[in-house]
Image (cartoon, rainbow, N blue to C red):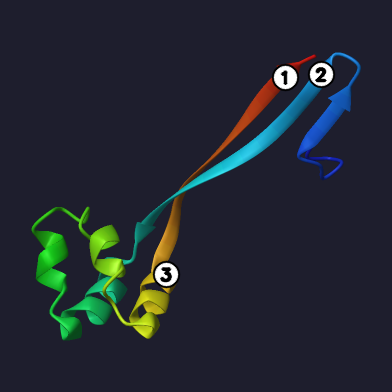
């Protein structure tokens, strides 16, 4: 699949599909620079970073875009799904 650059292979007996799952972490320094002026930095520290998702909805658009840029791919996992006919 990688050699041919495809995500799915179709055959008489079914389909094999490949998926890629990425998990992210944030560059803490960049995140602090974005959230501290908005008085949101302490809020995410109180909940060990889980509150970041809740805070994103109330941030100005530019700040949300900056937070998105502070994302770093932490891990990539490939999996294969086999669907038989």
Indicate the quadrant containing the C terminus: top left, top right, bottom left or bottom right. Answer: top right
**Could you tell me how far apart the alpha carbons at marks 1 and 2 are, in whole angstroms?**
5 Å
Label 1 neighbourhood size at 10 Å, few (<14), some (14-19), many (20+)? few
Residue of label 2: 14
Q: Which residue is nearer to you in this view: 36 or 55?
A: 55
Dot 1 corresponds to which residue? 83
Residue lying farthest to the right in this orientation = 12
Quadrant location of the N terminus in the rendered image: top right
Q: Are marks 1 and 3 in contact (CB under 8 Å)?
A: no
Judge from the rendering whether residue 55 lies leftward or rightward of residue 68; answer left or right.
left
Residue 60, image quadrant: bottom left
Q: Nearer the viewer, mark 2 or mark 3?
A: 2
Label at residue 68 = 3
Number of labels in the image equals 3
Residue at the image point whose x is 41% and y is 64% from the top: 71
Whichever of callouts 1 and 2 sits on the residue coming sooner in the sequence is 2
In the figure, 47 relative to 41: above or below? above
Q: Is disc 3 placed on a helix, strand or loop?
A: helix
Q: Is residue 78 above or below residue 52?
A: above
Per the image, label 1 sits on a secondary structure element best described as strand
Spot occupied by residue 21 in the image (x, y as percentages of width and height)? 54, 42
Looking at the image, residue 67 sits to the left or right of residue 12; the answer is left
């Amino acid at each position: 699949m990688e050699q041919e650059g495809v995500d799915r292979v179709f055959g008489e007996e079914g389909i094999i599909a490949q998926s890629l799952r990425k998990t992210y972490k944030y560059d803490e320094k960049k995140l602090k620079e974005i959230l501290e002026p908005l008085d949101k930095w302490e809020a995410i520290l109180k909940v060990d970073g889980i509150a970041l998702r809740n805070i994103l909805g109330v941030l100005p658009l530019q700040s949300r875009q900056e937070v998105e840029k502070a994302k770093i791919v932490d891990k990539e996992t490939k999996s294969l799904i086999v669907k038989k006919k």
